[in-house]
Image (spheres, rainbow, N blue to C red):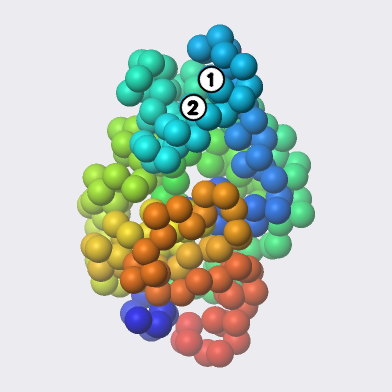
Amino acid sequence: MPFDPSRVDCWIFDLDNTLYPASCTLFDQIDVRMGRFIANLLGCDDAEARRIQKMYFHDHGTTLAGLMHYHAVDPQQFLAFVHDVDMSVLASAPPLAERLRRLPGRRLIFTNGDAPYANRVLDALGIADCFDGMWDLVAMEYKPKPEPSAYRGVIEAFDIDPERAVFFEDSARNLTPAKALGMQTVWLDYATEWGDRAKDDAAIDETIDDLAAWLDALAADGTLG
């Protein structure tokens, strides 16, 4: 079904590689640091650390979830280490503040990162004041997207009517639970190695590769009122 903005009064956004393009390479830094954390934890080489990292990500939704399950890793220690990254790369991201403010209704962040990191990203992008709330990994009790409980949690916490909400994500598999609950969905397809894993075309209403340009087009055609 084509995306219908007239039905939306709650705009829900993933954070990483959604509110900025993957070409900014911020998440590449995090990816490297996750590998380094695993290598240090398990005393393995970089190649084995990367294999384990990707296996946990694919099997558990996040690398952290796998590390907590198999190695009882302290999540705060892991998050502090992997999020120690250079935010200056986000200076090249397209400006979104005015585009986001044009959207009618509430705007929320729904991220598998934690709030301190997410707030740093939003500050670096100049959009921290564009959102009405955030549902982060800690609020999810470390049970990340695509766990159904993460979606039920954000719906209950912010009293969201799923039929009046749209969810933006770069990881296609994370759209499936949102669609099952009645949300409209928009997939940010940046042709990344993880973006189309477990992709379900039936769970995607719209596919885009440039959020800023898409929001401009949405405003230009008058569909936002």
- Horizontal arrangement in the rendering, residue 59 relative to residue 36 (left or right): left
Question: For the point 64% across and 30% down, which residue is it?
Answer: 32
- Under mark 1, the amino acid is Ile
Q: In the image, residue 116 lies at what x, y percent?
A: 52, 34
Residue 78 vertical position relative to residue 212 in the rendered view, above or below = above
Which residue in the structure is indicated by mark 2? 52
Which residue in the structure is indicated by mark 1? 38
Q: In the image, residue 131 lies at what x, y percent?
A: 48, 56
Residues at circles 2 and 1 in contact by the CB criterion of under 8 Å: yes
- Horizontal arrangement in the rendering, residue 199 relative to residue 92 (left or right): left
Secondary structure of the residue carrying tag 2 is: helix
Q: Quadrant of residue 174?
A: bottom left
Q: In the image, residue 21 lies at what x, y percent?
A: 65, 57
Closer to us: 56 or 166 = 56
Q: Quadrant of the N terminus?
A: bottom left
Question: For the point 40% across and 74% down, which residue is it?
Answer: 205
Q: Residue 83, which numbered label?
A: none
Question: For the point 62% across and 78% down, which residue is it?
Answer: 216
- Under mark 2, the amino acid is Ile
How far apart are the two marked residues, 2 and 1, measured between alpha carbons? 8 Å
Pair 2/1: label in front? 2
